[in-house]
Image: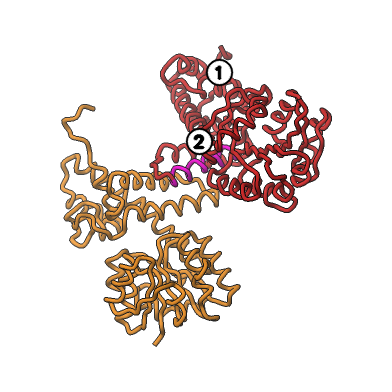
Chain colours: A red, B orange
Amino acid sequence: MSETIGFIGLGNMGAPMAGRLITAGYSLVVHDARPEAARPLRARGATWATSPAELAAATQTVITILPTSREVREVLLGPKGLLEALRPGSLVLEMTSADPSATRELAGEVAARGSALIDAPVSGGVRGAVEGTLAIMVGGDPALLERARPVLTAMGRNVFHVGPIGAGHAMKLVNNMCSGGILALTIEAVAVAARAGVDPARAVEILQASSGRSNASDNKFPRFILNGGFDAGFAIRLMMKDLDGYGRLAQEAGVPSPVARAATEIYRLAMARGMAEQDHTAIARLIEEWAGVSLRAQGGIA
Amino acid sequence: MTRIGFIGVGTMGLPMATNLVKKGFRVTAFDSNPEAVRAATAAGMTAAATAAEAVATADVVVTMLPSSPHVEAVYTGDGGVLAAARRGILCVDMSTIDPAVSQRVARAAQERGVRFIDAPVSGGTPRATEGTLAIMVGGAAADVEEARPVLAAMGTNVIHVGAVGSGEVVKLCNNLIAGVVGVAVSEAFRIAEGFGMDPRVVTDVISKSSGNTFLMGFMHPVPGLVPTAAASHEYRPGFMTDLMCKDLGLAVEAARNLRVPLFVTPAAQQVYRLASSHGLGRRDFTSVYAFLKPSSSQAPV
């Protein structure tokens, strides 16, 4: 396979995703605001583009995965942006965890220039990106998804069509609200168990076998909290952005969201405590502090 | 006499503009709702077919609109106030909106040689009708002084609080407190009643204790305790639940941008949202008390 893919955004997620594409046999043209981020991929044969416009000239399939909608807008519409040079009939796969209404607007700008943008945010963390097992949620024309499917399946195991343009990004916010909210709740509840005399590791083991089971009990606690690692690879500030995105989405949709709002503020409190760059599982430290209890496994992890 | 172009003659704008007419101002009114314009004509104002027409002959422009996007569109949109206004004219926006939007519109106005101040109000429809609103004004001191006679025709407390946008900041903080207190007083009285207490007695005691609030004195959520309160009139607004929801949303959004952790405000906002989902959106916000009705004591718990 020698199709060329343009890849913009080589951060924690983007770099290993781009690596999967090289493994699958694609040729890559890459760009990032920090040129040094491209070094490992260039060592594996990727070509460097000095700007999104230069990248657009070399390919008709472009992937963007950036911190927020603001950077996506800059990459598409800014000086030397993609839209200055994107050839008609190109396809942009927008994989950022972005704001659905901003995505719909940008898709309109791309369509006005004879190309298409679909949203395809991912879930599964750095490990899912490295292993190529991400869940990918696609919003947009199903025919465009079919065109992109070989590229997407090189990065993810589950590729879902969610609905029209923006639906992927909406679903991503919904997922992260569930992920972040349930995590905060489970940490709080395990802290209560610990104060009631239960070994946190034992509490988690019981949750795993009971109706309170979730990704927090099965995955986050054993891998990142009980061992004090706090290295799931998703910073509090990024979770904050998605939780606030969910809050706006709920407001636009006119759905009351009292539970989500309360959980969201736990993360904002962590931000205020200077924890913005720490991993999102580190909100456990905050809850440990105010509960006066440790959530490390007492007798090692089963 | 000063000629006023008044844009937005709805629930609040109409009684406010009517007070201007009563004090002898010549008012030309525009509203996107033709029925509101007809009501304005009946109250002695001249009808305008467009915002631009209302502004064309005015010395002072007053706007009273539902939300930030409305204000931005009316001022900076096609055929908007800034396009039609004469240079040097003074615009007074009395809507409750995001302070950042006030500042943005003020900058756009300045570029066109138009002066802009923000002057949101507190007091709801009853005090708008009496002409006794509290008005919090943000803008250059000279502009505020020039607007003062106009504002004094609509409110008794006209307070210059700072630079442009700062009227909105104070308004947003005030409504945050009123909104949270509306839920708090309602919850407290539901509990007291659950214990079989007479709400009148509870009110008398609390009004002399640390829990005393303006809301309990003038807008008591329990029906029948304050004769002029919305609660005593089937929760006719007053200040609608949906608008309280909107204002608390402005506070939540501002806190997001300022990175302030906020627990009680979003919770209160969601209670109003739930009340709205239960059909109380267009009632007075104190109808949250009705929303908090307990389940039957016969029901199993």
- Counting labels gives 2
Residue A36, how many percent across, how many down? 80, 38
Kind of residue at disc 1: Ala
Kind of residue at disc 2: Gly
Asked if residue A180 shows in the view, the reply is: no
Left or right: B125, with B51 as reference point:
left
Does B227 appear in magenta? no
Q: Which residues are magenta?
A: A236-252
Left or right: A40, with A174 as reference point:
right
| 1 and 2 marks on the same chain | yes
Q: Main secondary structure of the magenta part?
A: helix
The residue tagged 1 is: A297
Image quarter for residue B26?
bottom left
Q: How far is the residue under mark 1 from the one under mark 2? A: 42 Å
At horizontal 49% and vertical 72% (from top left) the residue drawn is B81
Please state which of the two labelled residues, at mark 1 or mark 2, is closer to the viewer: 2
Q: Between residue A78 and residue A237, name the one nearer to us.
A: A78
**Chain of the residue displaying label 2:** A
Q: Is residue B176 above or below residue A218?
A: below
Residue B45, how many percent across, how many down? 33, 79
The residue tagged 2 is: A163
